[in-house]
Image: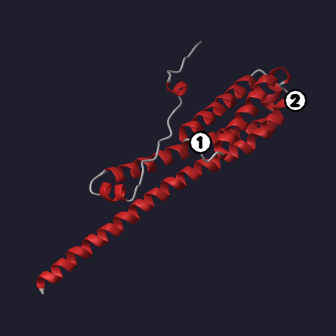
Amino acid sequence: MNLTYIILAVVGAVLVWLILTYNGLIRSKNRVDEAYSDIDVQLKRRYDLIPNLVETVKGYMNHERDTLVKLTEARTSAMKVHDDPKASLADREQVENQLSGVLKTLFAVSENYPDLKASQNFLQLQDEISDTENKIQASRRFYNGNVRDFNTKIQIFPTNTIAGMLHFKNYEFFQAAESERENVKVQF
């Protein structure tokens, strides 16, 4: 009878371990999905702010129509890839980095227009977009932290055996664009 209790205890312990491992994997997966959703929320906010920025800038920047066209095209392209369920993380990253680049160009060009720089609407939109860009970066860091934790969890023994049997897959990290990895050029 003692052997039966020992076998039941071992089977019970293994079952409890399996349940806890599975629940931990699901919890980590859901954190990664939530973090990705947070990025989506910030991107949507940026998409909503850009048309307001374009309208504010139009009256001041008659000679910079090309920049506004590029911004509108970059936003449209980013939204299209964002809404495409088949788009990879790399595709989304690429169009979002292009949009960020055009926004930086717009703000740099705005330096040539003192009236625009002094416009309360422009300053407010610039602050909101800057704040949104910071939140996007923070969301990406949060996402990458959750991806690191999840990927580590499904790669270490003995959890990797359960993760493999249940077909859990690694998530991809958000990475800096190639242009952002270059050294900053400072000129005086």
Task: Determine whether label 1 and label 2 are within 8 Å by CB.
Answer: no
Q: Is residue 71 above or below residue 64?
A: below
Left or right of residue 47, residue 91 in this image = left
Determine the CA span between mark 1 and mark 2: 36 Å
Residue 24, by quadrant, is: bottom left
Label placed on residue 76 = none
Q: Is residue 55 above or below residue 138?
A: above
Label placed on residue 59 = 2
Q: Which is nearer the eye, 117 or 19?
A: 19
User: Please, what is the three-letter code of the amino acid marked with disc 2?
Assistant: Gly
What residue is at 54 percent from the left and 17 percent from the top? 185
- Circle 2 sits in a helix, a strand or a loop, which is it? loop
Give percent across and percent down for residue 79: 69, 41
Q: Which is nearer the eye, 133 or 51?
A: 51
Residue 99, by quadrant, is: top right
Residue tagged by mark 1?
Answer: 87
* Disc number lying in front (1 or 2): 1
Q: Is residue 139 above or below residue 14?
A: above
Q: Going from the N terminus, do you reach mark 1 or mark 2 first?
A: 2
Give percent across and percent down for residue 46: 69, 42
- Circle 1 sits in a helix, a strand or a loop, which is it? loop
Residue 75, by quadrant, is: top right
What residue is at 35 percent from the left and 58 percent from the top? 165
What residue is at 74 percent from the left and 45 percent from the top? 48
User: Please, what is the three-letter code of the amino acid marked with disc 1?
Assistant: Ala
Q: Report the quarter where the N terminus lies.
A: bottom left
Give percent across and percent down for residue 161: 30, 56
Give percent across and percent down for residue 57: 81, 31
Left or right of residue 116, residue 147 in this image = left
